[in-house]
Image (cartoon, grey):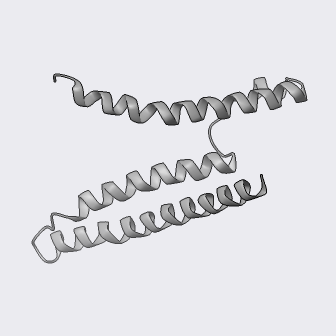
Amino acid sequence: MQIYLKAMDLVYRLCIWISGLSIIIMSTVIPWGVYARKVLGTGSAWPEPVAILCMVIFTFFGAAASYRAGGHIAVMMLVERLSGGTQRALAHAVNVLMILISLLSPAYLLSFERWPF
């Protein structure tokens, strides 16, 4: 169990670093696009797609880090009124549901490829 927790802590720190680097890249790419358009008179084609990609990376890896840190959106009013054992059971149920959603989301997205439109 200790090895698992250390591995998850490593993944957590990696997610934070990836999120931070993507925000730094996005924060440098956007001003370059503005500079190229306004000062140089020719807009670069790559800054906007790179900034959008960085925002997606920041959002997904930041959400994973936030979930690991317990900073995700949660309705605590109901949970705080439950007993200790019920709170632990509910916490495990939430984790199982998150795993299930994480496993089913790619299958759901891949099913769009077979749609006729």
Horizontally, residue 41 falls left or right of residue 68, namely left
Horizontally, residue 51 falls left or right of residue 94, namely left
Quarter of the image for the C terminus: give it.
top left
User: Which residue: 64% across, 63% down?
Assistant: 10
* Whether residue 115 is situated above or below residue 45 in the rendered picture: above
* Whether residue 17 is situated above or below residue 49 in the rendered picture: below
Count of numbered marks: 0
Return the residue found at the far bottom. Answer: 40
Q: Quadrant of residue 42?
A: bottom left
Horizontally, residue 10 falls left or right of residue 30, namely right
Looking at the image, which is closer to me, 7 or 52?
A: 7
User: Which residue: 38% across, 28% down?
Assistant: 108
Looking at the image, which is closer to me, 39 or 15?
A: 15
Percent of width and height locating residue 30: 30, 66
Percent of width and height locating residue 97: 61, 29
Looking at the image, which is closer to me, 20 or 28?
A: 20
User: Which residue: 15% across, 63% down?
Assistant: 45
Percent of width and height locating residue 79: 78, 27
Return the residue found at the far left. Answer: 42
Horizontally, residue 70 falls left or right of residue 85, namely left
Percent of width and height locating residue 114: 23, 26
